């Protein structure tokens, strides 16, 4: 059932609005030169950080549709009746969210880096950092989505929760501190399913 | 033979309100039990408790595998009906025949009427293969033909050794043992 759920969510992501966060990511990257100016050296210096900020804000966009539609439609209840634990549901959601979000983001990082006058080496290190950090970011998004599911103004609340919690990932990712970033991403990926599972369980009662 | 559902002195409280106390209940194979009672008496909560979606404050519960049809459709609205049902069970086509929706198999779920959605949720239950069906207000939205098909589904399920627990304030056609909540 976990594979079926991942497949369903990936299909829904790609037939829905998977392009939207990526378009948003590119748009944010495109806005930076307008705000900073055309100084290529300055843009290249802040490029990695700008890409990370763009990635964080882009990751925020789909949060409302990660858990809430399935909660309100009774899908989560039916998954439990089919023997899936809440934590397994959360794991499936994290994997599906990462698959619909991260590969496209990594591809989009190439044109975005050109907009920011980044050289090939900077792009490569940023790509590695994004590849390491996006699983943690996906897990964080699912965790926040589960905690805020069903709440009024959940989208705004999710932003308020997700962005500060993602700051450590941002720091280590933008600084190319791969080991620390890997450790943090691993902790988030491993720990979030338990948080999300508990939130799904609490929302049911 | 052990029952498909058993409550032993179960007490359930929701939102601080006592819904029922020391409730004993048994649903055996081949049996259909209707839980009746006024709005807010705890019928739906009893079904969710029976499904394992709620926890009793005290008392013991035993259940076999269950399938639940309530107000939530739990079907992907963008997919054709048969494809949406196949996510839950490979026996979708047969179940759609049984509820009279075979001709709508290719229609996206979002285009179905409320009565057709109700039948679709019944098809999900019928396709599940679970021995115990939990039906919350199964007549809501159904026309007379739909109600007749529901009665046939229940009879066939009982005949094949299954059991049905339905929560409804309406009179269900067929042979039902009945308990009343809120009295």
Image: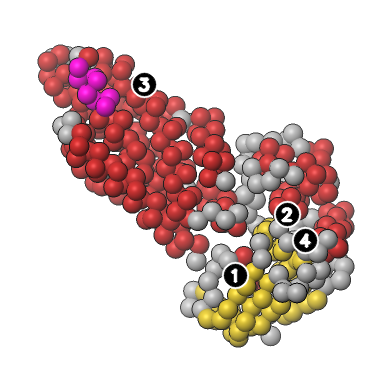
Q: Which mark is residue B49?
A: 1
Toward the viewer: A61 or A85?
Answer: A85
Instruction: Point out the stretch of residues depicted in magenta.
Output: A121-128
Contact, CB < 8 Å: mark 3 with mark 1? no
The chain identifier of the residue carrying mark 2 reads: B
Contact, CB < 8 Å: mark 3 with mark 2? no
Nearer mark to the viewer, of 4 and 1: 1
- Crowding around mark 3 (Cα neighbors within 10 Å: few <14, some 14 to 19, many 20+) is few
Q: Residue under label 3, please give it.
A: A107
Q: Is residue B176 above or below residue A174?
A: below
- Crowding around mark 1 (Cα neighbors within 10 Å: few <14, some 14 to 19, many 20+) is some
Mark 4 element type? loop
Mark 3 element type? helix
Are marks 2 and 4 in one subunit? Answer: yes
Residue at 57% of width from left, 52% of height from top?
A79
Rendering coords of residue A40 (x, y %): 15, 13
Q: Quadrant of the N terminus of chain B?
A: bottom right
Q: Is residue B108 above or below residue B53?
A: above
Q: Residue under label 2, please give it.
A: B129
- Crowding around mark 4 (Cα neighbors within 10 Å: few <14, some 14 to 19, many 20+) is many
């Amino acid at each position: 059932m976990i594979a079926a759920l991942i497949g369903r969510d990936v299909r829904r992501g790609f037939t829905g609005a998977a392009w939207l966060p990526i378009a948003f990511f590119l748009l944010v990257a495109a806005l930076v030169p307008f705000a900073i100016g055309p100084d290529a050296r300055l843009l290249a210096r802040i490029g990695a950080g700008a890409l990370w900020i763009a990635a964080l804000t882009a990751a925020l966009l789909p949060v409302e549709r990660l858990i809430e539609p399935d909660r309100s439609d009774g899908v989560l209840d039916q998954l439990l009746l089919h023997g899936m634990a809440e934590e397994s549901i959360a794991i499936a959601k994290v994997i599906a969210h990462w698959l619909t979000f991260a590969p496209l983001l990594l591809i989009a990082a190439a044109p975005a880096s050109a907009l920011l006058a980044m050289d090939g080496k900077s792009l490569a290190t940023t790509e590695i950092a994004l590849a390491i950090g996006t699983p943690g970011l996906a897990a964080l998004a699912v965790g926040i989505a589960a905690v805020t599911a069903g709440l009024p103004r959940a989208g705004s609340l999710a932003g308020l929760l997700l962005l500060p919690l993602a700051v450590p990932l941002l720091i280590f990712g933008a600084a190319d501190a791969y080991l620390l970033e890997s450790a943090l991403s691993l902790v988030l990926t491993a720990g979030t399913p338990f948080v999300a599972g508990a939130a799904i369980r609490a929302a049911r009662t | 033979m052990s029952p498909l559902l058993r409550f032993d002195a179960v007490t359930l409280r929701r939102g601080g309100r006592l819904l029922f106390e020391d409730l004993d209940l048994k649903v055996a194979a081949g049996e259909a039990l209707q839980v009746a009672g006024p709005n807010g008496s705890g019928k739906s909560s009893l079904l969710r408790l029976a499904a394992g979606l709620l926890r009793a404050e005290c008392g013991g519960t035993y259940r076999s595998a269950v399938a639940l049809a309530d107000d939530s459709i739990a079907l992907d609205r963008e997919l054709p009906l048969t494809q949406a049902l196949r996510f839950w069970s490979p026996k979708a086509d047969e179940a759609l025949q049984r509820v009279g929706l075979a001709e709508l198999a290719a229609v996206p779920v979002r285009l179905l009427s409320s009565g057709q959605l109700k039948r679709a949720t019944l098809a999900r239950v019928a396709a599940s293969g679970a021995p115990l069906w939990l039906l919350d207000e199964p007549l809501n939205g159904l026309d007379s033909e739909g109600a007749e098909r529901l009665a046939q589904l229940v009879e066939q399920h009982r005949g094949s050794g299954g059991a049905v627990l339905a929560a409804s304030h309406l009179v269900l056609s067929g042979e039902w043992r009945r308990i009343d909540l809120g009295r």
